[in-house]
Amino acid sequence: MNQPTNRHSVDNSLFSRLRFVLVETSSSGNIGAAARALKNMGFSDMVLVKPRFDDALTQDQAIAFASGAQDVLQAARIVESIDEALEGCNYAAAVSARLREFSPPIVAPRKLALQLAAESDLRAALVFGSERYGLPNAIVEKCNVLINIPADPDYASLNLAQAIQVVAYECRMAALPDGQDARQGLDQQGSVIGFQGEAASLAQIDGMFAHLEQALTAIDFLSPDNPRKLMPRLKRLFSRTQLETEEVNILRGIARQILATRKK
């Protein structure tokens, strides 16, 4: 008799490539419920950024709400910054019911899940904000896309664990080998055309933006006292391109040449 295949044994499956990041979560019960939601859907990589309580992972309420997903709690990491939480990722999606003026492109959970499952080089993070304040603009602007769950507009605010459950479910359905072919769900803009290089990491992209800001300031295109409008717009523009490492290097090379020329 053939033994069933363990879907999670494939190192490059979406189950092993996808990280769930919870930012400044205030309720340990919600952290436990989030762990349960992840385990329900076959995911396990959870990172907390500055939760309200240092012992949030071991509080009674977290353990009770995890309800059998204590292994996910025990494996979770607590970090001090979003940059630490996104280490090793080359793609990030912010989850928010609140739309922003300078947000990255907005996608529905299903479309994003299909893309993540289809593009095996993406090591992605899904970023969820605190129950009280949601996600700050500075974190949203670091992400490639903004996920907006299509809930009733009269009451679109989901509980944290509910939002995680919805997105994790869509990712599971896209990742299962006996489910829909992920590539069928991508629109023309999301299709694979020609050569694809390695996706740039979020740290590489952040470094590129810092370098580009220096160059634009040096040629007086950007005011150092008021860069807030232009840089978010540039981030929004580039977030639609899904930058590759070589492309980031080209842009940094342009910035380097501008700075070198200004010094002469």
Image (tube, helix red, strand yellow):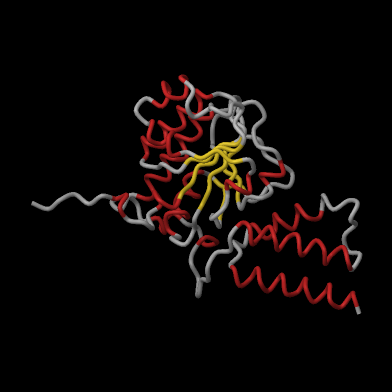
Could you tell me which residue is drawn at 89 percent across and 56 percent down? 224
Up/down of 97 relative to 261, above or below: above
From the top left corner, tell me how far across and down residue 96 is, in percent: 61, 37
Residue 75 occupies which quadrant of the picture?
top left
Q: Position of residue 181 (x, y in %)?
A: 36, 56
Q: Is residue 256 left or right of residue 184?
A: right
Point out the residue furthest to the left here. 1
Q: Residue at x 78, y 73 (%)?
A: 256
- Which percent across, then down, holds residue 195? 50, 75
Q: Quadrant location of the C terminus?
A: bottom right
Decide which of 128, 28 is in the foreground and name it. Answer: 28
Q: Residue 77, relative to residue 208: is it above or below? A: above
Tally of numbered tags: 0
In terms of depth relative to the viewer, which is nearer, 262 or 92?
A: 262
The answer to whether 89 appears left or right of 171 in the picture is: right
Q: Nearer the viewer, residue 173 or 191?
A: 173
> In which quarter of the view is residue 130 placed?
top right
The residue sitting at 54% across, 54% down in the picture is 89
Name the spot of residue 72 as percent of width and height, x first. Answer: 41, 36
Which residue is painted at 49% across and 35% down in the image? Answer: 164
